[in-house]
């Protein structure tokens, strides 16, 4: 069996470095334009060059999304963008539109092309079509079962790779092709500007009684009728591997560093444990369940992999996340006295017990005994977002400190 690639998302350089530190084999990012997460911070040209360099220095691949559904007015700009990407040299471009694919083949002949899930890739004929045109990988439609993916693997060339989503938010529309956002707000999901109307509460209004709203209720539990649970396949790694999936893809280019750290570290351990032995993997199932739930999520489902989703894959009573832990920042520097530099992301206090997430999957509990601002002034708490701090801990071996390690606190 071939060990699958762990492919993590990154919306900015901070998150990319976290993904690399916690075990990603590859990271996918978007530029300022022509990707499907326009609301993410994304990477300008200089940041993208830095990202490529950083990933390659650490033996990690970098993929760039150019997966919008292009309109006429987009094509001239896409050409210029592809010229820029040819010079930057990421490892692959993720594309859904045939016009952009054709341009990329001409402008970026030395960069691999991966076909986005937005292209609705549901059968082995589609995979063979893209392979014949020079694509090296196709991302499966989210609506496929493991049996269908296995059937694709049996009917495509060995060098054609299958990438499949294994974790993250699910879209209400087929392979992410959605018009709701465009219809309601004028922001086109297929141009990267989705407003996520599937997470909204809906009402109906009878035309003869304007202003009188009646709730849309599937049952007595609530009205969020389109709100899907999140995909989580960490307990089913053997089935994913046996289906012939080459790359395990995690959704979330708008997620925090804590989310990326928790998911990357857990899937890294799950994959490595399975390839060590079936027993090692089975013995750690409870650990995977526990750790994966320590980042924000909307309850979990296995999506379409084992059967068609039912009412049990939806969340009717709320559109909010479950939040077990809060992200506080990451270790940016380590001083001689054992204190660390931290840029505050959320409030914490002297006396709080924080968790430092170690690469090996364990967590070091560290009690805060001192907080100082960048001028050396003592503080009882760290209430100001993005404030640079010098923090001292007790109850932890200082030798475990390493730049980049994520620090969190139980919510």
Image: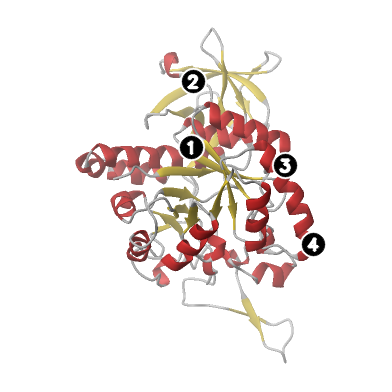
* Closer-to-camera residue (199/395): 199
Q: Which residue has dot 4 on it?
A: 73
Q: Secondary structure at mark 2?
A: loop
Q: Which residue has dot 2 on it?
A: 402
For the rendered model, the colour scheme is secondary structure
Which mark is first along the chain, 4 or 3? 4
Tell me residue 207's x, y (percent). Answer: 71, 89
Tell me how far mark 1 sits from mark 3, CA to CA.
Answer: 30 Å
Which mark is first along the chain, 2 or 4? 4
Tell me residue 128's x, y (percent). Answer: 46, 62
Residue occupying image coordinates x 70% and y 68%: 182
Badge 4 local density, few (<14 within 10 Å), some, or many (20+)?
few
Q: Residue reaching furthest left?
A: 279
Which mark is first along the chain, 4 or 1? 4
Looking at the image, do the residues carrying marks 3 and 4 touch, with CB atoms under 8 Å apart? no
Looking at the image, do the residues carrying marks 1 and 3 touch, with CB atoms under 8 Å apart? no
Nearest-to-viewer mark from 2 and 3: 3
Asked if one can make out residue 294 in the rendered structure from this viewpoint, the answer is no
Nearest-to-viewer mark from 1 and 4: 4
Which mark is first along the chain, 1 or 2? 1
Q: Which residue has dot 3 on it?
A: 84
Badge 1 local density, few (<14 within 10 Å), some, or many (20+)?
many
């Amino acid at each position: 069996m071939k060990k699958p690639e762990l492919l993590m998302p990154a919306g900015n350089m901070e998150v990319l470095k976290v993904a690399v530190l916690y075990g990603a084999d590859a990271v996918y990012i978007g530029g300022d334009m022509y990707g499907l997460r326009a609301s993410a911070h994304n990477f300008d040209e200089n940041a993208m060059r830095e990202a490529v360099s950083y990933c390659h220095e650490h033996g990690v691949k970098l993929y760039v999304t150019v997966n919008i559904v292009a309109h006429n007015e987009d094509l001239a700009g896409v050409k210029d963008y592809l010229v820029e990407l040819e010079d930057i040299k990421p490892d692959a471009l993720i594309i859904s539109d045939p016009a952009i694919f054709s341009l990329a083949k001409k402008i970026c002949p030395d960069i691999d092309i991966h076909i986005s899930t937005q292209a609705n890739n549901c059968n082995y004929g589609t995979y063979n079509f893209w392979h014949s045109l020079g694509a090296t990988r196709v991302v499966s439609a989210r609506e496929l079962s493991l049996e269908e993916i296995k059937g694709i693997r049996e009917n495509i060339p060995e060098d054609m790779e299958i990438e499949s989503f294994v974790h993250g938010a699910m879209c209400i529309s087929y392979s992410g092709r959605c018009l709701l956002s465009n219809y309601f707000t004028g922001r086109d999901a297929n141009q990267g500007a989705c407003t996520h109307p599937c997470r909204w509460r809906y009402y109906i209004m009878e035309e003869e009684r304007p202003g009188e709203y009646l709730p849309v209720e599937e049952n007595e539990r609530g009205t969020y009728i389109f709100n899907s649970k999140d995909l989580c396949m960490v307990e089913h790694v053997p089935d994913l591997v046996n289906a012939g999936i080459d790359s395990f893809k995690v959704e979330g280019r708008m997620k925090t560093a804590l989310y990326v750290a928790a998911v990357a570290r857990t899937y890294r351990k799950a994959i490595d444990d399975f390839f060590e032995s079936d027993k090692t993997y089975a013995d750690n199932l409870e650990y995977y369940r526990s750790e994966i739930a320590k980042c924000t999520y909307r309850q979990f489902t296995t999506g379409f992999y084992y059967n068609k989703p039912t009412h049990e894959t939806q969340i009717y009573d709320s559109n909010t996340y479950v939040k077990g832990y809060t992200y506080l920042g990451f270790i940016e520097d380590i001083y001689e006295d054992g204190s660390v530099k931290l840029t505050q992301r959320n409030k914490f206090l002297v006396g709080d017990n924080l968790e430092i997430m170690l690469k090996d999957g364990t967590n070091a509990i560290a009690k805060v005994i001192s907080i100082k601002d960048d001028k050396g002034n003592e503080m009882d708490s760290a209430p100001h977002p993005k404030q640079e701090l010098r923090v001292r801990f007790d109850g932890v071996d200082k030798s475990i400190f390493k730049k980049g390690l994520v620090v969190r606190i139980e919510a």
